[in-house]
Image (cartoon, grey):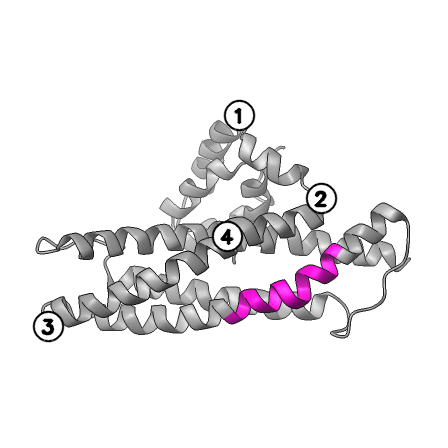
């Protein structure tokens, strides 16, 4: 793949996920903002485009087996992968982070009032993410998997009650942007999850898991916004011909 100013950010990360940390370090959103060109992204972030492209070319000069595996999955397999890998991660970590932030507010809130904002933001995110994943697992993903089977079997597919697949996908993308914004605010008010000098073990662990949670969410959204959703829209169009 030749990388140019017109190459979209999501396409680069789709090719090689090892480029994701470089985008993050340059404050370029590769998941919700993956549809922007490198020129647009660099202009918004105040980054020198040619320098970034040179760094990206160096990274993509070596293969990324993980990205190659993801791109080898059929759409039905990719839906299953997202549920098993990312939805399960979110469900596993929400209870721990909810309880830990509550405890930190009680113990350290007086000296670190930013914890109250983080608790509020994460609480809202936990509830919305839970509903978001349920909608994907009960409505959107089954329809995508149905289309994938229809393609393999050479059969038609009954239109979904929600209309064209672009309808729920548009709603999911909007919700992704909401969650991305919440975690951006959490990172900002916590000094990018900076561990204070008076942090106890619970404090330290909570911030580390929160940062890991955000990183996992970025990859989760990337897989959907930049790979699964575009392919689903393309497949539905092909099946309707």
Q: Is 207 part of what is drawn in magenta?
A: no
Disc 1 to disc 2, C-alpha distance = 26 Å
Disc 3 to disc 4, C-alpha distance = 34 Å
Residue 59 image point, x, y percent: 47, 30
Which label is found at residue 86? Answer: 4
Q: Residue at the location (59% across, 66% down)?
A: 172
User: Badge 3: how crowded within 10 Å, few (<14), some, or many (20+)?
Assistant: few
Q: Quadrant of residue 170?
A: bottom right
- Residue corresponding to mark 1: 61
Closer to viewer: mark 1 or mark 3: 3
Q: Earlier in the sequence, mark 2 or mark 4?
A: 2
Magenta stretch in the rendered image: 131-145
Left or right: residue 67 compared with residue 147? left
Q: Main secondary structure of the magenta part?
A: helix
Closer to the camera in the image, 49 or 30: 30
- Residue corresponding to mark 3: 110
Residue 50 image point, x, y percent: 47, 37
Q: Residue at the location (91% across, 54% down)?
A: 155
Q: Which of marks 3 and 4 is nearer the N terminus?
A: 4
Disc 1 to disc 3, C-alpha distance = 50 Å
Disc 1 is placed on an element classified as loop
- Residue corresponding to mark 2: 74
């Amino acid at each position: 793949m030749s990388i140019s100013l017109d190459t979209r950010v999501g396409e680069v990360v789709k090719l090689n996920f090892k480029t994701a940390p470089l985008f993050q370090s340059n404050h370029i959103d590769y998941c919700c903002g993956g549809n922007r060109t490198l020129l647009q992204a660099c202009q918004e972030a105040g980054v020198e485009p040619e320098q970034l492209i040179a760094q990206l070319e160096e990274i993509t000069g070596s293969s990324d087996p993980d990205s190659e595996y993801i791109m080898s999955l059929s759409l039905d397999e990719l839906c299953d992968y997202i549920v098993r890998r990312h939805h399960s991660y979110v469900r596993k970590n929400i209870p721990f982070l909810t309880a830990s932030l509550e405890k930190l507010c009680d113990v350290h809130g007086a000296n670190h009032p930013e914890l109250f904002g983080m608790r509020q933001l994460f609480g809202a995110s936990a509830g919305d993410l839970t509903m978001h994943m349920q909608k994907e697992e009960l409505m959107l993903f089954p329809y995508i998997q149905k289309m994938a089977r229809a393609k393999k079997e050479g059969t038609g597919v009954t239109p979904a009650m929600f209309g064209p697949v672009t309808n729920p996908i548009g709603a999911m993308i909007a919700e992704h942007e909401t969650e991305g914004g919440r975690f951006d605010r959490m990172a900002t008010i916590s000094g990018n999850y900076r561990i204070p000098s008076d942090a106890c073990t619970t404090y330290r662990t909570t911030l580390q898991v929160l940062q890991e949670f955000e990183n996992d969410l970025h990859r989760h959204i990337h897989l959907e916004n930049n790979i699964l959703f575009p392919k689903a829209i393309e497949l539905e169009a092909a099946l309707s011909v």
